[in-house]
Amino acid sequence: MKYLTAEEVSERYRGSISVGTLRNWRAMRIGPPYIKIGKAVLYPIEELEMWDNRNIVVCRASKRLTMGARE
């Protein structure tokens, strides 16, 4: 299994989730799952991918868009 540090997780999400936010989420027990070994906090990549999938927002196409596709 491969792991990312909090800094690498922040980079993965292009800075939209800061290291500080990850720290706060850990304190509140929300956000992506992580493991802690001594002082090291690591995020399993597989868990991040599952967390991503749980947070997908599915949008339905508007009627106008679907009608245009049939023409």
Image: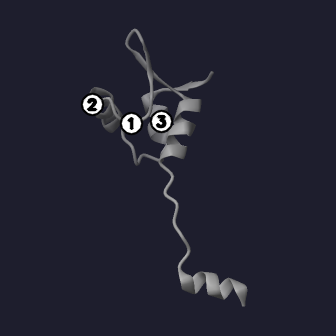
Residue in the image at 39% along x and 43% along y: 17
Mark 1 is surrounded, within 10 Å at the Cα level, by few (under 14), some (14 to 19) or many (20 or more) other residues, namely: some
Residue in the image at 56% along x and 86% along y: 64
The x and y percentages for residue 67 are 63, 87
The kind of residue on which mark 1 rests is Gly
Q: Which element carries disc 2, helix, strand or loop?
A: helix
Q: Which quarter of the image is occupied by the C terminus?
A: bottom right
Q: Name the mark on residue 31.
A: 1
User: Whole-Å distance between the Cαs marked 2 and 3?
Assistant: 18 Å
Q: How many marks are shown on the rendered structure?
A: 3
The kind of residue on which mark 3 rests is Val
Tell me which corner region of the image, top left, top right, bottom left or bottom right, holds residue 3. Answer: top right
Query: Which of label 1 and label 3 is nearer to you?
Result: 1
Q: Which element carries disc 3, helix, strand or loop?
A: helix
Q: Which residue is mark 2?
A: 28
The x and y percentages for residue 28 are 27, 31
Q: Which residue is mark 3?
A: 9
The x and y percentages for residue 59 are 51, 66
Q: Which quarter of the image is occupied by the N terminus?
A: top right
Q: Is residue 70 left or right of residue 9?
A: right
Residue in the image at 47% along x and 26% along y: 5
Query: Which of label 2 and label 3 is nearer to you?
Result: 2
Cβ atoms at labels 1 and 2 below 8 Å apart: yes
User: Whole-Å distance between the Cαs marked 1 and 3?
Assistant: 12 Å
